[in-house]
Each structure stands twice: as C-alpha cells, then as structure tokens.
Image (spheres, rainbow, N blue to C red):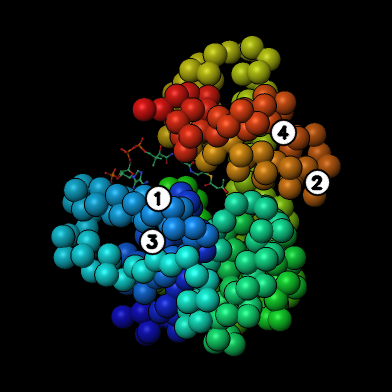
C-alpha cells in the first residue's frame, strides 16, 4: 500500500520514550515496518510495554480492530543495536533534547544506514537541524520531522529543512507525513522552537512564573485557560504532560538562540527538574499522579 504513495516502507525509530513510542505507534499503524531502538534492554522493555499498552488501549476503545492490533504488533521489532538499522528507508531520532547525544546518533546512523538516499530525521523541538545534518556525510538527506504529544492523537507535524536539506528530501518527508501517516504538515525554518514551541513555550514559562510568584493557585491557572479559552489542558497540566526537563531544555535552546527574557526558564522550573519532579513520567510535577 505504502509503495504507491512513497518510497519509504522500512522505518527506524531511535528512542522509545513517550515521543519515540508514539511515533513508532503512528508509523506501525499506518502500515510501515518499524524497528525501534533503545540503549539498554531495560529501557527497551519499558518502551515496548508503553507502546503495546497504548495499542491495546486503542483496540479496547474500538479505534483499531483485533486484526489490526495483531498486524500492527507484527510490524514492530525492537533492538538495542543501532547496527540493525542497515535496511531502513527512514530513521526518526527521538531521544533526549541534548545536542551531543543526538549528534553522536546521527554519526552512527550515517555509518549504518545503507541506502544512500535514506532520510535521517530528528524529532527535536529546538536543536538546530543543520548541526545534525553536517555531522553526517549526507546533509542533504537530514530533516526535522517534529511530532506532538501524544503523537497518536495530535494531527500536526512540523517539517524543518536544514540549510543543507534537498527539495527531494522535503517532498518525500511531506508525502510520508501527509499521505501515509495522515498528519497535517506545516513547514518552518530551522530556528529554535520552529512555529509551535516558539509560541507555546513562552506561554508555559509565563504560567510557571505566575504560579511561582503566587498570583494564583495551579488549579486556578489551569482552570483559567481550560474554561476561559477552551484549551484542552491548562498550562501547568500540559507542562507535566510534556515533561519539565524537556521544557527546560527547549527553553535553554531558545534562550541561547534569541537571548530574549521570555525564553528564560524560571528558577522554579529548574529546581523541579533538579528534584526529579519531571511531571507525569516521574509521577510528580505540578501535580502528583497515581
Ligand atoms: N495515545 C493514543 N490515544 C490517546 C492517548 C495516547 N497516549 N491519549 C489520549 N488518547 C485519545 C483517547 O483515546 C481519546 O480518543 P477518543 O476521544 O476518540 O476516544 C482522546 O485521545 C481523548 O483522550 P481522553 O478522553 O483519555 O483524555 P482527554 O480528553 O483529556 O484528552 C489529550 C487527552 C489528548 C492529551 C488532550 O488533553 C490534549 O489534546 N491536550 C493537549 C496536548 C497538547 O497540547 N500537546 C502538544 C504538546 S507540545 C509538544 O508535544 C511539542 C513539543 O515539542 C514539546
């Protein structure tokens, strides 16, 4: 089915945290053969369980049939060895927002992925794509493909070409995102935060500053935006969903790019990260979770 729409049928996903697992789920549900890599057996097991639980929930809610559930599971394989990505047509890296870690992964992928016109993509929210592109010998085939959390639910994907990315790579990535994955693609320049985070993150940081300065309680801040502006989640709940470490990293990248105070992480955010209160994923952030 996918061959008629794109030349991509084998996808690799590096990282099986909440974004990597969501991206792998989206790709496998769209009929693609997906291999997921994590660094350790333990991380892989946690990621695999996260992904399979999400698929089982989708089946329980009637979004996919039992046959589709089984077929989707069969399209997923898991590994701790990036060397197994040799035959991939597209690899999407979705690891922590750390430039050095991502750069090293791109260098490995460059060595491992055999197809010369395979696309090497990053789900980064804020790290310059050009830095990842020039870490490889194929900077024309590197692009940002940025999903939103939860990836199986949110319809948007940002496409971010680096200065080096070829038009052919952009068109192939766009065809995959729109025609195969069924998402809406928007294009942004390679500037930290792209479109959505450049708008969203200052808003989330403002809500944390408001809470820190005692202007309103966390519930009133969240209710204000949910009931006053019809947002599905208030900003503190959303921060917990995204992960406070992720928000702090994005804010730091944007601050270092633009030097604008509105991108500066407030002290409370940094203290919560230092305390390991990262939001839903650790069971505690602005709220506590069971
Ligand atoms: N996987 C698959 N489906 C999921 C899901 C998941 N993890 N979580 C929720 N869903 C589905 C449910 O199945 C349900 O579908 P139906 O209505 O068709 O049954 C639907 O989403 C709503 O789910 P719930 O009823 O359980 O919960 P909800 O109504 O409270 O919605 C939410 C949950 C989808 C997370 C919603 O609150 C929401 O959209 N919040 C805003 C999220 C947002 O802004 N994300 C962007 C973050 S920014 C980002 O990701 C970029 C970055 O770089 C930081």
Query: What is the tally of numbered marks visible in this picture?
Result: 4
Q: Mark 4 points at which residue?
A: 265
Neighbourhood count class around disc 1 (C-alpha, 10 Å): few under 14, some 14–19, many 20 upward: few
Residue 90 lies, with reference to residue 259, above or below; the image says: below
Q: Please state if 188 lies on the left or on the right of 28 as rendered.
A: right
Q: Is mark 3 within 8 Å of ligand 1?
A: no
What residue sits right under mark 3 in the picture? 26
Given residues 223 and 277, the one toward you in this image is 277
Q: Nearer the viewer, mark 4 or mark 1?
A: 1
Find numbered disc 1 in the image and state the secondary structure of the residue it sits on. helix
Q: Which of 198 and 113 is in front in this view?
A: 113
How far is disc 4 from disc 1 in space, using C-alphas?
A: 30 Å
Of label 1 and label 2, which has the lower sequence position?
1
Q: Nearer the viewer, residue 249 or 187?
A: 249
The disc placed on residue 272 is: none
Q: Residue at x 58, y 80 (%)?
A: 112
In the picture, the quarter occupied by the N terminus is bottom left
**Sequence order check, earlier mark of 4 and 1:** 1
Q: Which residue lies furthest to the front in this view?
A: 41
For ligand 1, give the image quadrant: top left
Q: Distance between the residues labelled 1 and 3?
A: 18 Å
Percent from the top left, x then y, of residue 114?
A: 55, 86
| Residue 46's disc number | 1
Task: Tell me which label, 4 or 3, sits earlier in the chain.
Answer: 3
**Would residue 70 be seen by someone viewing this image from the given angle?**
yes
| Labels 2 & 4 near each other (Cβ < 8 A) | no
Q: How crowded is mark 4: few (under 14 residues within 10 Å), some or many (20 or more)?
A: many
Q: Is mark 4 on a helix, strand or loop?
A: loop
- The residue tagged 2 is 256
């Amino acid at each position: 089915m996918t061959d008629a729409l794109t030349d991509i049928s084998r996808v690799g996903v590096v990282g099986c945290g909440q974004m990597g697992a969501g991206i792998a789920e989206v790709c496998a549900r769209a009929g693609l053969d997906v291999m997921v890599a994590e660094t350790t057996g333990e991380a892989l097991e946690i990621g695999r369980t996260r992904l399979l639980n999400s698929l089982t929930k989708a089946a329980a809610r009637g979004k996919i049939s039992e046959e589709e559930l089984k077929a989707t599971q069969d399209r997923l394989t898991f590994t701790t060895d990036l060397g197994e990505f040799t035959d991939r047509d597209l690899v999407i890296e979705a690891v922590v927002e750390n430039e050095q870690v991502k750069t090293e992964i791109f260098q490995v992928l460059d060595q491992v992925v055999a197809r010369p016109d395979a696309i090497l993509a990053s789900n980064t929210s804020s790290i310059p794509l050009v830095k990842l592109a020039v870490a490889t010998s194929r900077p024309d085939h590197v692009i940002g493909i940025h999903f939103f959390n939860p990836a199986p639910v949110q319809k948007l994907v940002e496409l971010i070409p680096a200065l080096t990315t070829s038009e052919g790579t952009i068109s192939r990535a766009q065809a995959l995102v729109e025609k195969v994955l069924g998402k809406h693609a928007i294009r942004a320049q390679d500037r930290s935060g792209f479109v959505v985070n450049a708008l969203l993150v200052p808003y989330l940081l403002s809500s944390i500053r408001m809470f820190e300065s005692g202007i309103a309680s966390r519930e009133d801040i969240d209710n204000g935006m949910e009931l006053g502006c019809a947002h599905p989640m208030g900003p503190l709940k959303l921060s917990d969903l995204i992960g406070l470490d992720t928000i702090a990293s994005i804010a730091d990248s944007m601050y270092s790019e633009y030097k604008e105070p509105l991108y500066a992480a407030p002290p409370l955010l940094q203290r919560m990260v230092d305390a390991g209160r990262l939001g839903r994923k650790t069971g505690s952030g602005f709220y506590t979770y069971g």
